[in-house]
Image: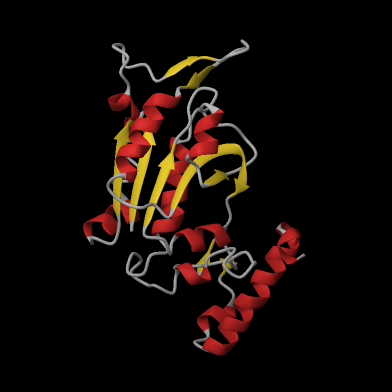
Amino acid sequence: MRIDIITCVPKLLESPFAHSITQRAQEKGLVEVHIHDLREYTEDKHRAVDDYAFGGGAGMVMMIEPIARCIEALKGERKYDEIIYFTPDGARLDQKMTNTLSLQKNLLMLCGHYKGVDERIREYFITKEISIGDYVLSGGELAAAVLSDAIIRLIPGVLSDETSALTDSFQDNLLAPPVYTRPAEWQGMEVPEVLLSGNHKKIDEWRETEALKRTKERRPDLLE
């Protein structure tokens, strides 16, 4: 898989892809992540990529021309399965969406900033609009990192145990059950005996029961 991310603040994306699972996925050659500095595509001598909004009001708007030049240049090199824009009015990101996107070959992500991008960019280029929650960030960079991480960990070979992602929360519309590790007793609190029994059938039944119980208590909407 290849992920291209367009941003006017590329340094915000340096750390998320330089460590842990996303770093190892790139080192294994399972995914390529390329960050594109939008300011390299502006003709403004001050490298500006934003301007005042027509009609007035607070905040600046990202201009059409730099974004269009960047997207057109990238589209000239390959075909993208989705061109994604992060926006509060986009479809809410969930596990089903990340599962689908993890099966694609080429994804292009556009990070908004300021008050967002000129609406005509959304109408002309964008194929999928995504929100990662009902709150506002300073820009789409953190959202791009969140989505990329959620997708990359699903790619076969990325996780050392490929069954791990299949037992994550939301994969089966349930929250994950409680988990424990050593020591078996801490300050009088003991690990459930069934987990120490070695009986895998009973352990699986316990986990299923606990996952359902936790989902009913904390996210009953998932069961509707």
Q: Is residue 94 left or right of residue 12?
A: right
In this view, 224 is above or below 12: below
Can residue 13 be seen here? The reply is no
Q: Is residue 8 left or right of residue 165?
A: left
Task: Identify the residue shown where x is 51% and y is 47%.
Answer: 127
Q: How is the image coloured?
A: secondary structure
In this view, 23 is above or below 189: above
The picture quadrant where one finds residue 24 is: bottom left
Residue 139 place in picture, x, y as percent:
48, 30
Task: Identify the residue shown where x is 22% and y is 57%.
Answer: 27
Can residue 31 be seen here? The reply is yes
Residue 142 place in picture, x, y as percent:
45, 38
The picture quadrant where one finds residue 48 is: top left
Residue 169 place in picture, x, y as percent:
57, 63
Task: Identify the residue shown where x is 23% and y is 60%.
Answer: 29
The picture quadrant where one finds residue 2 is: bottom left
Number of numbered discs overlaid on the protein picture: 0
Of 212 and 145, nearer the camera is 145
Of 38 and 183, nearer the camera is 38
